[in-house]
Structures are given as C-alpha cells and as structure tokens.
Image (cartoon, helix red, strand yellow):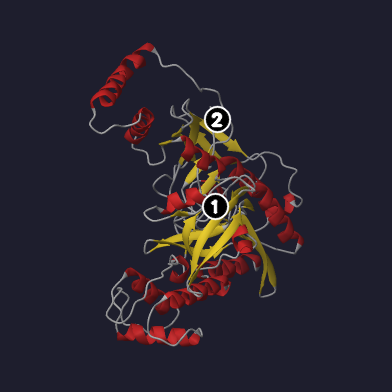
C-alpha cells in the first residue's frame, strides 16, 4: 500500500484546486484478506452483483459495478475528504504535487459551449506553437470537440512527453481556422515565489507559497537564502489561497522558522493517541540561525487550508510571528491514500492534526491576530467571455463586468447584470481609456481589455490591502 499524493491542481491547460494534507511514506497492506465475518457480509454484494449482471435491462460492465460499490462505501463515511479514486483518477492525484508536469502549458476555459485558450504560459509549448488568447480549439488530432466536457478535452490534450498534438483552432482576429502542431513538454511547477521589497528604507522578503509540494522545501530554502543575502530584515509569508499539500513539506518550512526540538503539530489517530511532530536539526539552510530569529508576518485568508493551517497554527501557538488577514478554512484531518488491487485507490481520513497547543481547528480555522479584508478586485474570479452584450441585455457576465468597472472607479448605478444606460457609459469610457474601439458594448475585445486591466491592477502590490497592512505592521515591529 502506498501513501500517495492528493490533488491541488492538475497543470496541463487548466488548474483545478482542492484542499488537503497528505501523509508521506508507504506501507504494504495491499491484498489484505478480510476475516470470515466480513466475508459473510460481502456475500450480499456478490448477490447484488450477480442479479444486476443477469437481469438488469440496462447492461453495466462488471468493473463499473465494482467501482460504484467502492465509491459508495467511501461516500457512506460522510467525510468529504474520503473517497474512492479510479485508476485514472489516482494517476492524476499522484502527479499533482510533482515538481513538474507534462503538458502544453496553456489555460483553457469553456465559454458558450466553445473551448477557448485563456493564456499560454510564457515559454511553454503552447506559446512556442503560436497559440494566443481567445483562440478557439475546434479539433484535437482531427477529432471535433462538440458535446465534450472541459475535462474530456483536457484528457485529449494530455499525453507523453515528446509526443505531438495536432490542433485546429479558430482565431477571431483573423476570422480563419489554423492548423497547429504542439509538442508536449515537461513544464516546471513553481510553488514558491519571492521578492525583496523595500519600504521606507527597510528591506524585507515577501514569499508566497501556492501549495506544499515535492519541491516546496527546496524552493523555500532558495527563496529565504536570497532574501537574507539581499539584506531582508523581516519576512512576510503569504499563504492566501494555499490549499495544502505534503505534511513533510510544511514540516520543513515550519522547522526552518522554529526552535529545534519544538513541536509544530500533533497527529492523532483513530484511537485518540497523540504523536508529536517535532522540529528536527537541519543543516540545509544557509542562514538557519538568522532565519529562526527573523520577524515573521503571515498572510492568510479563508482559502488557506490544511497544510497551510499547520504552518499558521504553529506560528500562532508558538508565538513565532503575527498573522494578518482572515480566519483560515478549517481542515484538521490528514488523508492516507491506499492502493487497491484493481489499480484504484481509497483515500481515507486516518488522522486528525492538532496545533502545538493541541487545538483541533477542523471546521473553525486558525484565527488571525489582526483582521484585514482584501480589496474586492483581488478576490473576484476573472471571467472569460466571447459573447456580445448591449443595452437591455441581462447576464452574469455583465454583472461581473459591472463589479470590475465599479472597483476600478467607473460610475455605475447597478451591478445586478442588467445592461442599463449608465453601464453603457462606463463601458464606453473604459474602452476609450484602454484604447479599444469606442463602442458601448461588451464583446470579446472588451473582456480581453478588462482582463489585462485587472491583472495589471493586481500586479501592483500597492493595491493589495492585506499586504499593505502587513507592511505597516512590519515597520511597527522593527521600530521597537
């Protein structure tokens, strides 16, 4: 039995997020036999299987019946984090936290029944092949995509490294179809990003962790080394939207900040027995002593879950830093993913994890030291639309645009999705300011310009309300 990985996102052309904390390591229970009493209970399942196979007017393959029974057993537990994974699903889960993926490197969305390229990743196979934002994927390997779901399209795009993918795309700007060949390549997945910032004559390191994956600890070491070498006097650690990951990875990150020998969390099994997770001696960090003493501010939000809560819980209970933002998600269980003989896997919550003060945060979250609400333009999901809207129309795409325009300072009298005259005036003004054809409609060009505008807005850290609060508090700490 192998304890494997649980999904944060599957990077191919689109990302899918999940909330999890994963045990590392492996055991060997595969093929364990049930005792005689259990065998008797399972004879009923054998009966039902035989009846369905013999008499059901709707034929079902035997493997699907077995998988249905397995999925049903997991569902009965009533735990949203315990589930049965098919062999294909299990393979996706296993690769989700790897340091690199094989794919084409483009984000795809489904809009109006069409599959649209949102943006190719810089330097990716998609960009090299010439794919552009708003390209519509019409065929893959000469097969039309009509009637498929987004996940089915992604499955067609997936493949082995070095293999070619033929795509027929429709490019609106040219009003023509193009045939492109994209080579699948290994795409590195970076989980840590860092920036040495300077405010009011003080240097500090800003480090964002998007998840705790295979390479997170190594990326964290590199980032902290660079920040300290650059003269950082404090660290702002950002785990907003971080859904979790490996217990091992968060343990190494937490351990680099905490005193050797301290307990950064506890594991509690089904019998209630506690096992401390202790910070072990480490020679990996170049500036280990300085890192352990450096002032730390942690940013979290309601999207910070599981492994990221292990970090914030340790920082809070051990008074290692100051937490700003919002109460975290509140996931206090750990999953163990076990192989089954049919190639599938059973993912089961086998432990609770507790903070250093032995607090179970499940359903409650980790409280912050200072509450700070984020600028709404940072929390709004960026939509992608190819439809056209004008005065008198009503749609959620219009409501989205109204919220964004209002947040950017344009005057609107409503944001309920009805395209009124004040919305038309704001749209026209926005298009003129962004050097888009001066019309009073929402179309592909308008939504593309809106996307660029909000992305640029978010890149400016001066607009990040929570970060600015953290910077202000950091100066307060350093001035003591």
**Res. 131 visible in picture:** yes
Relative height, residue 150 to residue 264 (above, below): below
Q: Nearer the viewer, mark 2 or mark 1?
A: 1
* Dots 2, 1 in contact, CB < 8 A: no
Density class for disc 2 (Cα within 10 Å; few <14, some 14-19, many ≥20) is some
Relative height, residue 130 to residue 8 (above, below): below
In this image, 30 relative to 229: left or right? left
In this image, 232 relative to 311: left or right? right
Name the secondary structure under disc 1. loop
In this image, 89 relative to 37: left or right? right
Q: Which residue is mark 1?
A: 11
- Looking at the picture, tell me which residue is in the foreground, 245 or 63: 63
Query: Residue 376, image x and y in percent?
Result: 43, 70
- Looking at the picture, tell me which residue is in the foreground, 102 or 184: 184
Name the secondary structure under disc 2. loop
Outermost residue on the top side: it is: 36
Density class for disc 1 (Cα within 10 Å; few <14, some 14-19, many ≥20) is many
Query: Residue 168, image x and y in percent?
Result: 51, 60
Q: Which residue is mark 2?
A: 2
- Looking at the picture, tell me which residue is in the foreground, 42 or 132: 132
Image quarter of residue 77? top left
Q: Tell me what residue is drawn at x 46 percent, y 55 percent.
A: 303
Query: Residue 59, image x and y in percent?
Result: 29, 32
Q: Tell me what residue is drawn at x 35 percent, y 74 percent.
A: 398
Q: CA distance from mark 2 to mark 1?
A: 23 Å
**Res. 292 visible in picture:** no
Label located before the other in sequence (2 or 1): 2
């Amino acid at each position: 039995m192998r304890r494997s990985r649980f999904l944060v996102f599957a990077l191919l052309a689109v990302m899918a997020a999940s909330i999890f904390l994963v045990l590392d390591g492996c055991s060997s229970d595969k093929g364990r036999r049930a005792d005689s009493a259990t065998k008797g209970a399972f004879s009923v399942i054998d009966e039902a299987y035989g009846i369905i196979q013999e008499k059901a007017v709707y034929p079902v393959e035997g493997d699907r019946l077995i998988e249905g029974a397995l999925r049903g057993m997991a569902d009965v537990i009533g735990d949203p984090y315990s589930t049965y994974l098919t062999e294909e699903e299990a393979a996706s889960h296993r690769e989700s936290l790897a340091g690199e993926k094989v794919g084409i490197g483009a984000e795809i969305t489904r809009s109006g029944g069409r599959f649209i390229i949102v943006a190719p990743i810089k330097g990716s196979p998609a960009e090299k092949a010439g794919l552009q934002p708003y390209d519509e994927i019409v065929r893959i390997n000469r097969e039309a995509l009509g009637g498929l779901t987004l996940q089915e399209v992604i499955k067609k795009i997936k493949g082995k490294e070095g293999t070619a993918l033929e795509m027929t795309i429709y490019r609106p700007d040219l009003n023509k179809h193009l045939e492109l060949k994209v080579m699948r390549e290994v795409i590195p997945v970076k989980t840590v990003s860092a920036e040495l910032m300077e405010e009011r004559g003080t240097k500090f390191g800003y480090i964002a962790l998007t998840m705790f994956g295979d390479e997170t600890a190594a990326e964290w070491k590199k980032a902290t080394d660079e920040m300290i070498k650059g003269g950082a006097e404090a660290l702002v650690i950002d785990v907003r939207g971080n859904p979790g990951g490996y217990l091992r990875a968060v343990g190494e990150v937490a351990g680099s900040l905490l005193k050797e020998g301290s307990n950064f969390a506890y594991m509690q099994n089904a019998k209630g027995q506690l096992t401390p997770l202790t910070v072990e001696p480490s020679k990996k960090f170049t500036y280990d002593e300085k890192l352990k003493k450096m002032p730390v501010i942690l940013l979290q939000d309601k999207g910070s879950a599981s492994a990221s809560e292990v970090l914030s819980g340790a920082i809070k209970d051990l008074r290692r830093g100051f937490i700003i933002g919002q109460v975290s998600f509140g996931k206090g269980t750990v999953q163990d993913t076990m192989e089954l003989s049919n190639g599938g896997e059973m993912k089961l919550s086998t432990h609770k994890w507790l903070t250093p003060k032995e607090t179970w945060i499940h359903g409650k979250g980790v409280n912050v030291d200072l509450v700070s609400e984020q600028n709404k333009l940072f929390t709004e999901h960026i939509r992608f639309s190819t439809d056209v809207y004008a005065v008198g129309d009503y749609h959620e795409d219009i409501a989205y645009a109204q919220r964004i325009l209002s947040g950017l300072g344009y005057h609107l009298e409503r944001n309920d999705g009805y395209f009124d005259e004040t919305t038309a005036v704001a749209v026209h003004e926005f298009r003129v300011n962004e050097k888009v054809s001066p019309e009073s409609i929402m179309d592909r060009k308008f939504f593309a310009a809106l996307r660029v505008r909000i992305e640029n807005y978010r890149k400016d850290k001066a607009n990040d309300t929570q970060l600015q609060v953290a910077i202000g508090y950091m100066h307060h700490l350093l001035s003591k």
